[in-house]
Image: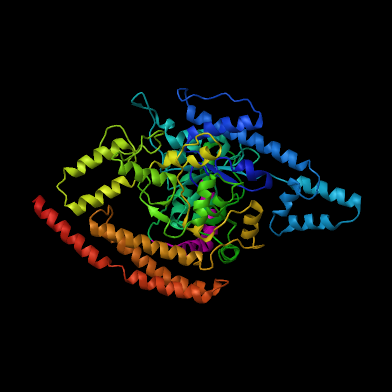
Amino acid sequence: MGTGFTIDTALRVAKYGIDSALSLLDDVLIEQMREYHSEQAGEPFTPIAATEDDRRARRITAYLNLLGRLVDRQVEQLRAQRFQPGSEIVRYFELLPEGPLKQRYNHMQVTADPERRRRLQEELRGEIVAGSIDVNIMTAADGDTYYAGSRLPAEQTVAMSALRGFAQSELESAVVFSAGMHQRLYAYCAQFPDFLPDYAGRLRKRIILKVSDFRSALIQGRFLARQGLWVSEFRVESGINCGGHAFSGKGHLLGFVLSEFRLRREELRSTLHKAMCSALTELGRPVPDVPYEMRVTAQGGIGTAGEQRELMRDYELDGTGWGTPFLLVPEVTNVDEEHVRRLCAATDRDVFLSDSSPLGVPFWNLRSSASETARRRRIAAGRPGSACPKGYGRINTELTETPICTASRAYQRLKLEQLEGQGLTRRQLAHRREAVLAKSCICHDLAGCATVKCGIEPEAAPAMCCGPAITSFTRVASLDEMVGHIYGRRSILGRRRRNHMFTRELLLNIAVLRRNVLKLTRGIWAGKPASLQQIKENLVEQIAYYRHLLADSVDKNKHRYLRDLNLAGRALRAIPLAGAIKAWTRRQRTLSGRGG
């Protein structure tokens, strides 16, 4: 969800028992929001200057502690309210899904005896709990930190200082690690007691891993277990049918991946428990008698209650995650009014998979966002690139000794000069220039959604990293409406024609493969042609999987579902991969001959 969309969502939803996660990437934004919410709540605010020691971790700790205090205050106020229409305490229970607690609330509502009703209300008040204030650390965005031209120690990198800021906070919640394995960061967790079992067997701070397949979960989970650390949740995410960065991987699709988790879940749990206990014994720490809870959840592209129901039923999941649709719920996320209107009007042509990210990973973008408009305007004015005001993407040393960001004005100027001197054909030069100029300052612009809405930086140019699922929703919704949609109490979908989330993911993967084959043809594909062939073979295999194993599991529109699979199969066969590989091979031979 970017850096700004959910930076303070906990203050809007945690009092209703709803979990949320905020990014710890941008400590400048975090400090701005700490000042803003301190003033709103009448809390004292002492700034932590950019020149102060360990300012990044300290800013994060201070903000998380503020969120914790304010949410605790909100929950206490909610518990004290009367059960009357329009009250926050009634809203808390009305938002719940069907289950034992909702049944007890409904029973209280129809209880006529005043004393019995009062006792039931007190029992319900005791059941109210706040949602978890979780945090996200994107492991790929872990650039070194420099001060006065000198590189600071490893503990001061972007991700390490973010972890320290969370670990030293008073929150009892979870850190979500996304974007792949980071051994140094994972090992660092073990230095903080809150991540290890205490003598009562509690984990004050939990670890959640975003993973794309079972193998990744096993490798990362085992590494953490050998440090004495437990993974409380494996969050299986569609690599492509999600917001923000898109990790299409090797063409493995969500349903196929979840089926392996369902079959091997207990194997994973027992393997990690054994490794964890061995590590804790060596450390002289308390060893749990039985494995801790290990949740398996899924997210990415879910758009209907039926799809959620299928996931929970067919793959025995513990939960699902919804992100992109909440961009149209102003009381939950930070999106300014103008961009809410643009998101409501967005079509599949407006939401595109871009090369905007300086991390070199495909990135979902809104074509009409202020950030994209500003990028194109700078190119037209002959001054491409950003001034790089925050520098979280400074990880490239291709052209400089000190890392710089590929979206920066400095990098793009140097890179374009380099291309001009390489003797490329006009077409080759145009393709390479396009790839260079596509990079955008997302670390600053993703904060713009919050700074514009809160009046902190009204002139910011917000970036929108919505997932493709946004095009199914065409109007602003309230929290009650969106929760009702998720639980099947109502539907707020705005367009009739909508692919099932599985076939949508399949079609997106085929589109990415087609795009990468085009890059191979143009000579700007950085990988090996064999990897594209493997992806194509995997997609063929998984079309067969969906056709034979999942057709009976789709609750509605089975004919459309199977028709989409057939269309996907034809689209996949039509990709000219063999010809592109032959052309690439001839080009490599020609270049090799020139070199000789």
As drawn, is 198 to the left or to the right of 155?
right
Q: How many numbered marks, from 0 up?
A: 0
Q: Residue 430: image x %, image y %?
A: 23, 51
In the image shown, does 216 or 210 lie closer to the viewer?
A: 210
Tell me which segment is drawn in magenta. Answer: 251-275
Q: Residue 113: image x %, image y %?
A: 91, 54
Above or below for 540 versus 189: below
As drawn, is 387 to the left or to the right of 560?
left
Above or below for 190 versus 296: above
Report whether residue 231 is seen: yes
Q: Quadrant of residue 135?
A: top right
Q: Quadrant of residue 574?
A: bottom left
Q: Which residue is depicted at the point 38% across and 70% down?
A: 540
In the image shown, does 86 or 295 lie closer to the viewer?
A: 86
Above or below for 304 versus 168: below
State whether the magenta stretch is mostly helix, strand or loop. helix
Q: Which residue is depicted at the point 41% across and 62% down?
A: 508
Q: Residue 584: image x %, image y %?
A: 20, 60
Report whether residue 202 is seen: no
Q: Quadrant of residue 206?
A: top right
Q: Residue 424: image x %, image y %?
A: 16, 49
